[in-house]
Image (cartoon, helix red, strand yellow):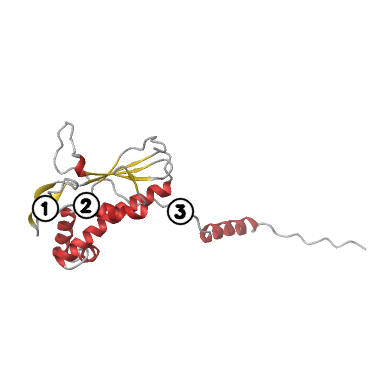
Amino acid sequence: MARRQAPEINAGSMADIAFLLLIFFLVTTTMDVDTGLTRKLPPMPEEPIENEDIKVKQRNIFQVLVNANNDLLVEGDIMDVSDLREAAKEFIIGDPNFLNEEYPEGKEETIPLLGTVMVSKQIVSLQNDRGTDYGMYITVQNELVAAYNEVRNEYALRKFGKSLDQLEKESANSKKAEMQVDAVKDFYPQRISEAEPKNVGDQ
C-alpha cells in the first residue's frame, strides 16, 4: 500500500503576515520621549550695546551659588532651597523708595498704562558647579522663575484686579489685556543671569 504524502503548507503569505505583525507592533508600542526644558533664550537687546565693560553694582545682584555637594549659597550664606523663592521675591520687589542700599537701585522708565515709574535694576545671578546634580539645578531654576511669576501675579492683581496668568489668557482676544501683560513684565523684568558652570567644589 502506497504511503500518503503529507500535504505541503503554502508559505507564500508568511512574509506578508510577518510584515503586518511588524507594522502592528511599531504602531502600538509606546516609546519614551525625552522632554527638554521649557526655557527660552534671552531676546536680542533692543538697543545696540557698546563694546565696553559694564559694571553692575553689588546691591543690584542677587547671587545664587550651588556647589558640588548641592549646597545652596545665597548672598554667601547657606540657605535651604525651600526658602529660596521668598528670598528672591524680597530682592526682586526691593525697597519701593529705592533708598535702602541692601536692595537694588531704581531706574526711571516710561511704561504704557503705568506712565513714568521707577523700575528696579535687579539681576539674579545663578552659578552652578560642574558637579551639581541635574535635579538640584532644575529645582533652583524653577524656584527663581516661580519667584518672578508670583511677584508679577501679585502686582497685576493690585494694579489691574487680575493675575498675570488671567491676563495672559485674555490677551489672545483682548488688546487691553495684552498691554497690561506687557506693562507688568516691563515693571518687573525677569533677569536671570546664568554663568558658565565652574569647579568650585564644596566651598
Which residue carries the number 2 mark? Answer: 92
- Out of 100 and 43, give the one closest to the viewer: 100
Task: Please determine whether, in this image, residue 69 is positioned above or below residue 94.
Answer: above
Amino acid at the residue labelled 1: Asn
Where is residue 110? Give x, y as percent.
8, 52
Residue at horizontal 36%, vertical 55%?
Answer: 82
Circle nearer the N terminus (2, 1) = 2
Circle nearer the N terminus (3, 2) = 3
Query: For the residue carrying disc 1, how many other residues have a C-alpha within 10 Å: few (<14), some (14-19), or many (20+)?
Result: few
Where residue 69 sits, quadrant-wise, is top left
Numbered badge on residue 97: 1
Question: On the picture, is 181 further left or further right than 12?
Answer: left
Where is residue 167? Give x, y as percent.
20, 64
Numbered badge on residue 167: none
Query: For the residue carrying disc 2, how many other residues have a C-alpha within 10 Å: few (<14), some (14-19), or many (20+)?
Result: many
Task: Please determine whether, in this image, residue 48 is positioned above or below residue 6.
Answer: above
CA gap between label 3 and label 2 equals 36 Å
* Mark 3 secondary-structure assignment: loop
Where is residue 162? Give x, y as percent.
19, 67
What residue occupies the far right of the structure in this picture? 1
Amino acid at the residue labelled 2: Ile
* Mark 1 secondary-structure assignment: loop
Specify the quadrant that holds the N terminus: bottom right
Which residue carries the number 3 mark? Answer: 33
Residue at horizontal 14%, vertical 60%?
Answer: 179
What residue occupies the far left of the structure in this picture? 116
Question: On the picture, is 33 further left or further right than 174?
Answer: right
Where is residue 11? Give x, y as percent.
68, 57
Residue at horizontal 40%, vertical 45%?
Answer: 71
Circle nearer the N terminus (1, 3) = 3
